[in-house]
Image: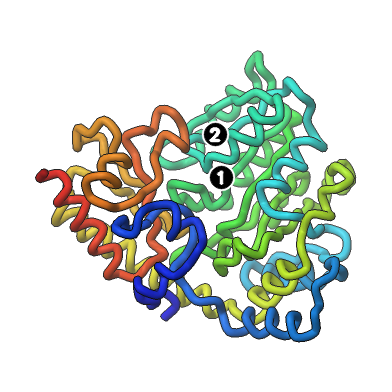
């Protein structure tokens, strides 16, 4: 049972989730999981430390481990030698793709509500945002077509798959339609698939590049999210079979920002901990069911659309009549949740809850949230 660490143990951590707020606040916000490092990952790191193997990373082990996972999980066979490149992390990979394939002043499409760094890499590097919001938590294909054909013609589209924060898992048909639209209008299709293994049992995640219509696309991914290895900063860029020129267009230092310990840890996770992440998602799925029950009993006005992707819950608190739900729950209920406005200015009545935690902590969090409304 991965999600079984006691709160006392978790509070000894020095990472962001457990150190951002005071000790009386229950943190269910940033995307860190309350899990112990997998033994195989720990063994690989210990072996490297024993050998003082602390130099620069080399070789294709990480790429090969991903390719083996892709074949086993999704019957997808990217070539680790020519189609996968090791990079620093997913958002730096997305930035590198933007820098290599777009120019300052270009328009870039996103689908709010969206993981905040999507906005940051666009506006922070002098590109302009074109927003095509999700509709009922699904991609708006008509909206994408209108944006692609509009007066502010975009040069790139940033896709989040599975989607953060809603947990939407895009279907094969949706991805094919997106690929066809991007090809029709000459838009670079760039996807973040860091949550690829984080789907409920029985849910099919479809890798973008396994869809023939998306062979021109590029994908960034990492073992960092699926195995809670953000402290080992590393990732991969994968090109479609028809995107060799796009991989070649990356800025010169894009492939030199990953570290040796990231390569070692991520490779070990992908090679030896596939069953572990599946067990984890069975527990997360049970936590989603638990959250639904708890909200129905204690906070029925909060709307939660249970989704099969990620370990994150996107909660609509509009009916509560709070000016700032996340601030209220943190100061009055002592529960830290992500502020929805970080995912788009129009989502201030939403909060994001991290469900990669013990059921007892989720139960305590909802009880605190409900009690805070009575004060």
Q: CA distance from mark 1 to mark 2?
A: 8 Å
Task: Please identify the residue farthest to the left as the structure is shown.
Answer: 374
Residue drawn where x is 74% and y is 58% of the image: 236
Q: Quadrant of residue 265?
A: bottom right
Left or right: 294, with 325 as reference point: left
In the rendered structure, find residue 141 and report the number of the disc placed on it.
2
In front here: 120 or 180?
Answer: 120
On the image, the x and y values in percent for residue 320 come to 19, 37
Quarter occupied by the C terminus: top left
Q: Residues within 10 Å of mark 1 (few under 14, many from 20)?
A: some
Looking at marks 1 and 2 on the same chain, the residue that comes earlier in the sequence is marked by: 2
**Coloring scheme of the render?**
rainbow
- Count numbered badges in the picture: 2
On the image, the x and y values in percent for residue 120 come to 61, 35
Q: Residues within 10 Å of mark 2 (few under 14, many from 20)?
A: some
Is residue 201 something one can see in this rendering?
Answer: no
Left or right: 332, with 8 as reference point: left
Q: Quadrant of residue 150?
A: top right
Q: Quadrant of residue 263?
A: bottom right
Labels 1 and 2 touching (C-beta < 8 A):
yes
Task: Please identify the residue farthest to the top as the structure is shown.
Answer: 151
Q: Which residue is mark 1?
A: 174
Residue drawn where x is 68% and y is 68% of the image: 70
On the image, the x and y values in percent for residue 212 come to 72, 51
Is residue 162 something one can see in this rendering?
Answer: yes
Quarter occupied by the N terminus: bottom left
On the image, the x and y values in percent for residue 9 come to 40, 75
Residue drawn where x is 69% and y is 57% of the image: 210
Classify mark 1: helix, strand or loop: helix
Classify mark 2: helix, strand or loop: helix
């Amino acid at each position: 049972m991965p999600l079984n660490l006691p709160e006392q143990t978790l509070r000894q951590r020095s990472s962001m989730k457990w150190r951002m707020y005071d000790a009386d606040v229950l943190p269910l916000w940033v995307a860190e999981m309350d899990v112990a490092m997998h033994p195989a990952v720990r063994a690989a790191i210990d072996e490297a430390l024993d050998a003082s193997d602390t130099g620069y990373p080399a070789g294709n082990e990480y790429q090969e481990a991903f390719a083996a996972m892709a074949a086993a999980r999704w019957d997808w066979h990217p070539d680790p030698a020519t189609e996968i490149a090791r990079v620093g992390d997913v958002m730096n990979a997305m930035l590198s793709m933007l820098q290599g394939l777009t120019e300052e002043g270009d328009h870039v499409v996103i689908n709010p509500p969206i993981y905040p760094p999507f906005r940051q890499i666009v506006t922070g590097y002098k590109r302009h945002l074109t927003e095509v919001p999700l509709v009922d938590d699904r991609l708006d294909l008509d909206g994408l077509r209108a944006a692609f054909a509009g007066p502010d013609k975009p040069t790139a589209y940033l896709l989040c798959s599975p989607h953060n924060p809603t947990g939407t898992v895009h279907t094969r048909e949706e991805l094919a339609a997106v690929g066809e639209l991007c090809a029709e209008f000459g838009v670079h299709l760039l996807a973040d698939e860091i949550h690829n293994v984080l789907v409920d049992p029985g849910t099919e995640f479809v890798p973008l590049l396994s869809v023939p219509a998306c062979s021109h696309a590029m994908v960034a991914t990492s073992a960092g999210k699926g195995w809670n290895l953000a402290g080992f900063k590393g990732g991969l860029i994968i090109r479609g079979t028809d995107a060799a020129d796009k991989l070649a267009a990356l800025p010169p230092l894009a492939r030199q920002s990953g570290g040796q310990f990231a390569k070692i840890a991520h490779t070990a996770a992908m090679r030896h901990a596939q069953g572990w992440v599946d067990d984890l998602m069975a527990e997360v799925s049970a936590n989603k069911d638990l959250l639904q029950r708890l909200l129905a009993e204690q906070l029925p006005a909060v709307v939660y659309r249970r989704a099969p992707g990620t370990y994150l819950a996107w909660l609509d608190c509009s009916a509560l009549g709070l000016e700032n739900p996340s601030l209220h729950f943190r100061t009055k209920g002592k529960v830290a949740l992500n502020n929805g406005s970080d995912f788009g200015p129009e989502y201030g009545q939403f909060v994001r809850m991290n469900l990669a935690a013990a059921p007892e902590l989720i139960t305590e969090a909802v009880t605190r949230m409900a009690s805070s409304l009575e004060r």
